[in-house]
Amino acid sequence: MRIARYTTGEDPSYGIVEGEPGREFIAQVQGDPLYQPVVLTGETVPLEDARLLAPVIPRSKVIGIGRNYADHAKEMGGEAPAQPMMFLVPNTAVVGPGDPIVMPAGAEEISYEGELAVVIGRIAKDVPRERVSEVVYGYTCANDVTARDWQRGDGQWARAKGFDTSKPLGPWITTDLDVSDLRIQSRIDGETRQDGRTADMIFDVETLVSYVSAAFTLLPGDVILTGTPAGVGLVEPGQRVDVEIEGIGTLSNTFVRR
């Protein structure tokens, strides 16, 4: 099931994306499906007539995982970590598909990082690996945009990875998906720059959710970013980055200077 958050010019709504490519539509549901059973309202809208929004706005937190692909750790000049490297991102960094990523003044080296994002569906603490599926609502695409010069200069990652618009999510949440071996790609203006598989993650989703929940109580709507494969690089104003994950879809955003 694909759960979208969208607007047609009024207040945001949620719906199920259905239909074949080119003829897709959104079937509206009552309320927020993260917090209540999915009940259709009977209203539908063609997908092309809706503006997709970030499928979830974390009410608590976004947790990032650094260097979770060995090839990416190597290209960044470091060794693969012995345990997951966590960092926190404010929910004000989240934007949706099609929204501009505003490159902040004072940062000159802005990089993309295509990632699989895990959306938590219920309160979770100290979750054992074998029960992780019980607390995961679904998955979406993410771009872990990073100001590399701020990252180097600050010595920690809060500003470099948490500035406004730096965490686009979308296009929707896909539920009931086996994410153990999915292709993940990032493209700049149509040119492929990253091409990896989730099977190459050092720490899989079950390990990450269990590990993160040992440190933080996870709340419905919290998002865990699972790391990026090799091929990260810098972007220029006006360039579009597409993050595509097999079984989910494509998240597209254009970078701008203001």
Image (spheres, rainbow, N blue to C red):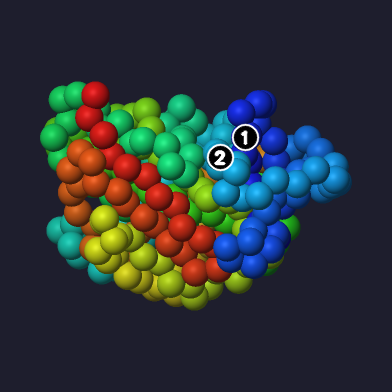
- Report helix, strand or loop for mark 1: strand
Q: Earlier in the sequence, mark 1 or mark 2?
A: 1
Residue at the image position 60 percent from the left and 43 percent from the top = 49
Residue 60 x %, y %: 57, 31
Q: 44 or 58, which lies in front?
A: 44
Residue at the image position 65 percent from the left and 26 percent from the top = 10
Q: CA distance from mark 1 to mark 2?
A: 5 Å
Residue 149 x %, y %: 15, 37
* Image: 220 above or below 75: above
Q: 56 or 224, which lies in front?
A: 56
Residue 20 x %, y %: 64, 67
Q: Which disc, if any, is residue 170?
A: none
Q: Which residue is mark 2?
A: 51
Q: 108 or 256, which lies in front?
A: 256
What's the amino acid at mark 1? Thr
Residue 189 seen from this side = yes
